[in-house]
Image (spheres, rainbow, N blue to C red):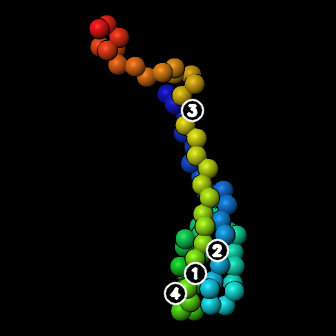
Amino acid sequence: MGKYHYAPVHAFIKCEDCGWASGSYKNALAIAKIHAKRYGHRVSGDLGISFMYDYRDDGPSVNSKSLRT
Ligand SMILES: [Zn+2]
């Protein structure tokens, strides 16, 4: 079975109205929304996500029928 990894690794959140900023990536969207809602501000940001698929141990996935023809 292949291994799979997917996780946010960095974020840059900034409020356009008051200059508030955060680098919290674990719940960046929730944090941004809470600030925007609470203060009536506009918050935007970038979220970086790390991901990986590891199928080294499995080898290539090939349809056995197509091998015979
Ligand atoms: Zn703000």
Ligand 1 closer than 8 Å to label 1 CB:
yes
- Amino acid type of the residue tagged 3 in the rendering: Asp
For the residues labelled 1 and 2, say whether their Cβ atoms are less than 8 Å apart: yes
Spot occupied by residue 49 in the image (x, y as percentages of width and height): 60, 55
Q: What residue is disc 2 on? A: 13
Q: Nearer the viewer, mark 4 or mark 1?
A: 1
Residue 38 in view (yes/no): no
In whole angstroms, how far apart are the C-alphas of marks 4 and 3? 40 Å
**Marks 1 and 2, the one that precedes in the sequence:** 2
Q: Quick check: marks 4 and 3 in contact, CB under 8 Å?
A: no
Instruction: State the CA–CA distance, disc 1 to disc 2.
Output: 7 Å
Q: Which residue is mark 3?
A: 54
Mark toward the start of the polypeptide (4 vs 2): 2
Query: What residue does disc 1 label?
Result: 43
Query: Which residue is label 4 attached to?
Result: 37
Can residue 24 be seen at all in this image of the molecule? yes
Please identify the quarter of the rendering in which residue 29 is found: bottom right
- For marks 4 and 1, the one nearer the N-term is 4
